[in-house]
Amino acid sequence: MKSKLSIHTILTGMIWLAVIAILITGCSTGIQKKAVQSDINELEQKWGVRPVALRLIGGDHFIDFRYHVIDPDKAAQLLRRSNEPYLIDEATGKVHTVPLTKLGPMRASAVKPKADRNYIVLFGNTQKIIKRGSIVTVVIGDFKAEHMKVM
């Protein structure tokens, strides 16, 4: 009975430590969130898009960048096939491109984007250089979303 109680106590303590760590992390990034929010507002006004997600997928072999179109006319430049997207790892300077498959590049492209829709670009990460928490810049033509954190 004593061992069950001590295991329960240890697990409860670990859960509380995890909760406290999450709260501390959330509090410490509050200032960073405000800075990121101003960058997002600038992207919305200039390019008509809002970044939605930047995350590792496919066993960390791909980086999934999603953005939401607010103004289709402004966002049209991001969807042009002539604008080849790439991602820069800010720590190493390594450039990651969009993989080309038999069906074409792994990115959304449209003649005319539609408002209130999400579009996707997949960047290769075959050497797994980009990790969760990495800070990157996404470039599509003249569009630049800088200092984005990979989730």
Image: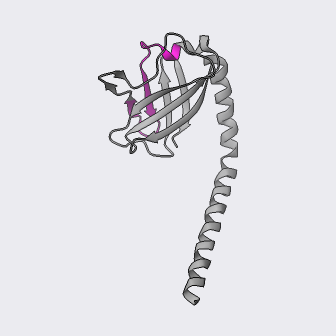
Instruction: Please provide percent x and percent y for residue 62.
Output: 40, 37
The image quarter containing residue 38 is: top right
Instruction: Please provide percent x and percent y for residue 49.
Output: 61, 22
| Region in magenta | 77-96
Rendered residue at 31%/25% (across/down) = 101
The image quarter containing residue 42 is: top right
Q: Is residue 150 above or below residue 39?
A: below
The quadrant of the image that shows the N terminus is: bottom right
Magenta includes 146?
Answer: no
How many marks overall? Answer: 0
Magenta includes 86?
Answer: yes
Choose between 72 and 94: the one closer to the eye: 72
Instruction: Please provide percent x and percent y for residue 4.
Output: 56, 83
Report the coloring of the rendering: one colour
Rendered residue at 53%/20% (across/down) = 143
Residue found at the far bottom of this picture: 2
- Left or right: where does residue 110 sit relative to residue 114? left
Instruction: Please provide percent x and percent y for residue 74.
Output: 60, 13
- Left or right: where does residue 126 sit relative to residue 113? left
Rendered residue at 46%/17% (across/down) = 109
Choose between 111 and 140: the one closer to the eye: 111
Rendered residue at 62%/18% (across/down) = 115
Choose between 59 and 129: the one closer to the eye: 59
Q: In this view, does 77 lie above or below 34?
A: above
Residue found at the far front of this picture: 1
